[in-house]
Image (cartoon, rainbow, N blue to C red):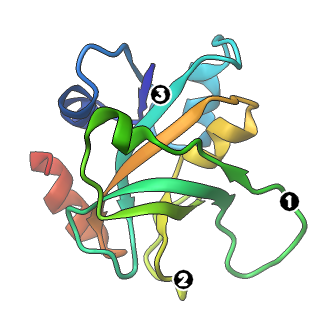
């Protein structure tokens, strides 16, 4: 099953994963929790969508490795998760970077000291719910700019 946050990402899901069932969750943790709670935790999940990055090129595709929450001002022990590898290879998708760390936040990230990573608003919550078969490819829509995000996502890059 392909999980996307918004209807605007459907074209991405259909382009890269044709024929797969698509479920739209809505943006953010609460929408995601509400819309995935009925799925068995063994459900194979592919998560595709837009992400921000401080330094990766806009429009580049990245395959996700480590998954953590984003909280830049505090540190406390919490789990880190991993997406299963091999999604790009299985579907013949050319990605700019593999095994990329992603930081999930509850709001749009507009600045960060972190580089060579991406930021989203859903993936850590998918894994935190207990899903065990999760893989993810993300498309960089912006370099931590809400304006760039809107420019890229209105036309689906």
Residue at the disc numbered 3: 25
Residue 141: where, in percent of width, then height? 26, 61
Residue 66: where, in percent of width, then height? 63, 58
Residue 89: quadrant of the picture: top left
- Where disc 3 sits, the SS reads loop
Is disc 2 surrounded by few (<14), some (14 to 19) or many (20+) residues within 10 Å?
few
Q: Residue at x 71, y 19 (%)?
A: 41
- Whether residue 137 sits left or right of residue 112 in the image: it is left
Q: Mark 1 or mark 2, which is nearer the start of the sequence?
A: 1
Residue at the disc numbered 2: 114
**Residue 78 disc label:** 1
Q: Mark 1 or mark 3, which is nearer the start of the sequence?
A: 3
Q: Residue furthest right?
A: 77
User: What is the distance, in whole Å, between disc 3 and disc 2 at their CAs?
Assistant: 27 Å
Q: Mark 2 or mark 3, which is nearer the start of the sequence?
A: 3
**Residue 37 disc label:** none
Foreground of the two, 88 or 101: 88
User: What is the distance, in whole Å, between disc 2 and disc 1 at their CAs?
Assistant: 18 Å
């Amino acid at each position: 099953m392909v999980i996307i946050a918004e209807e605007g990402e459907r074209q991405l899901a259909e382009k890269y994963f044709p024929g797969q069932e698509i479920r739209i969750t809505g943006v953010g943790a609460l929408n995601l929790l509400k819309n995935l709670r009925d799925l068995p935790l063994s459900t194979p999940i592919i998560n595709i969508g837009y992400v921000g990055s401080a330094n990766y090129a806009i429009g580049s595709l990245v395959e996700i490795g480590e998954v953590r929450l984003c909280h830049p001002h505090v540190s406390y022990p919490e789990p880190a998760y991993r997406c299963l590898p091999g999604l790009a290879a299985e579907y013949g998708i050319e990605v700019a970077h593999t095994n990329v760390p992603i930081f999930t936040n509850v709001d749009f990230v507009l600045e960060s000291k972190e580089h060579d990573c991406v930021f989203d608003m859903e993936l850590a919550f998918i894994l935190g719910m207990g899903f065990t078969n999760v893989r993810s490819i993300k498309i960089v829509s912006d370099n931590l700019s809400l304006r760039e995000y809107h420019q890229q996502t209105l036309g689906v890059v």
